[in-house]
Image (spheres, rainbow, N blue to C red):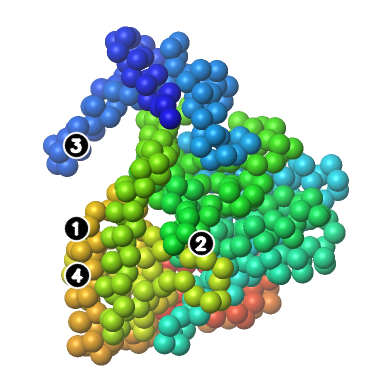
Amino acid sequence: MKKYICEGLAEYLSMDRKPWHMPGHKRKNFIKELDEKAGLDVAAFLSCDVTEVSGTDDLHHPEEMILKSQQQLARIYDSYASFYMVNGSTGGILSAIGAVAEYGKEAGKNKIIIARNCHKSVYNGVKLFGLEPIYVEPQYVELEDSYKSYIYGEITPQQIESLVKQHQDICAVVITSPTYEGVVSDVEGIKRVLKPYGIPLIVDEAHGAHLPFMDGEDQLPKSAVKQGADIVVQSLHKTLPSLTQTAVLHVNNEKLCDGVKKYLSVFMSSSPSYPMLCSMEQAVVDAWNRKKDLQSFNEYLSNLDAFRNSLKDLKNIKLLGKADNYYAYDKTRIVLYGDINGETLATKLRDMGNIEIEMSGINYVVLISTYADRLEDFKYLENTIKLVDEELDLRENQFSNESNNEVLLNNQEVIKELKKLVGTVSVDNIYVYPPGSYIVAAGEYISQEAVHKIEELMASGKRIIGL
């Protein structure tokens, strides 16, 4: 596989053209602190930050290097069409919902089934295009040793089938798979349910960009692209070595392709970043090359398995893995849980080993591993987790209730007022970020269950947005 954008940009830069155009930094270093304090060669990075000029290409109307790269992208993923995005999965989700809304409008379909744990961009897209949401709620996963679970599981084909039979005017279904915690739904089974009705399936696979390259027996679950979802959105920067804010969108349904293109041009910046485009192409081509040389991923997966096995006998901290009550699990996602406040566990990992986690829940934390992690990285993390587990054992989990009670005490007035709102309609979206899934969406009735969940999140030290 070729690197059309990277090679084309290198050729352009070798011409030494003098930039009397955007961007305003003119490929000179303007962030001296990163050089002086962090030791980074910022000038080298900025030197490739060019724009659409003679000799490059335009992401919105590609004709040369970007066109060839995106055509190759589709061949790699075996999709009908694939697109680079420079504003993350959010732009892809909005474009996908716009495409299905327009497609469904022709048949008078204005309802959309969305999983309750979808990212806020899904809710925003539904509102933006005037669709009526029908929610499907995942069950919580079953945790080892009867710990109370706050982790959402899969969306099942049976759940989708039940809703489709109840509502005749569904324009699309949107689910998140894998979830932030690594739980994978049966996308193939859901697609089988929807096919007779002609209902498109959108999968937010933001956390599964690595799956197309590491699936197979005893490895990882199949990607939603391979399982036949109509539109799949992946954040390359989450699990592949690509710059933050980079994503790809795959279309498997020819009828939706023009709509997707139309809304990508609406939601995506008209000034796409070439460093981002280069990093996306590099990430995909490198992952593809590694897939052909299985030893590269085997070493990573072997290190990951050894790490997971090393944590089996901990007393206070458990590791989420494959369970019987959900379809599949992405073992690259490291979710630690126990009888302990998630924020406290995150603090302990940071204080005792300088480990910065991805996010914390009520009684769990999420860490992301990728093939950029080496054996020494896993060993260091393993040792830190074991140190934290030992300290929790010595202190008899004293963190569990003390911190909760203190937070609840400080928020008594908020909770008192919140309880009065049960049965009323929310004027704002209420959620925690990350993961960015709404507890209550604007326009929804506030339930007793939602208030209870907000209380639990506040007690765990989470900041609730929208209150």
Q: Secondary structure at mark 3?
A: loop
Nearer to the camera, 272 or 316:
316
Dot 2 or dot 4, earlier in sequence = 2
Is residue 306 in view from this perspective? Answer: yes
The tag on residue 129 is none
Question: Residue 439, percent across and down?
Answer: 57, 68
Characterize the local packing of mark 4: few (<14), some (14-19) or many (20 or more) Cα atoms within 10 angstroms: some
Q: Quadrant of residue 14?
A: top left
| Distance from Cα at disc 4 to Cα at disc 3 | 29 Å
Labels 4 and 3 touching (C-beta < 8 A): no
Spatial CA distance of label 1 from label 3 is 23 Å
Disc 3 residue type?
Leu
Work out whether 423 lies above or below 329. below
**Left or right position of 309 against 449:** left
Quadrant the N terminus occupies: top left
Residue 131 at least partly seen: no
Q: Secondary structure at mark 2?
A: loop
Sequence-earlier tag: 1 or 4: 1
Spatial separation of the CA atoms under disc 2 and disc 1: 27 Å
N-terminal-most mark, 2 or 1: 2
Q: Residue furthest bottom?
A: 396
Marked residue nearer the N-terminal end (3 or 2): 3
What residue is at 24 percent from the left and 83 percent from the top?
A: 392
Is residue 140 placed above or below 255 in the rendered structure?
Answer: below
Res 383 label: 4
The residue identified by callout 2 is 179
Q: Which residue occupies 56% across, 35% down?
A: 74
Label 1 element class: helix
Left or right: 283 in relation to 313: right
Residue flagged by tag 1: what amino acid is it? Glu
- The residue carrying mark 1 is 376
Q: Which residue is mark 3?
A: 40
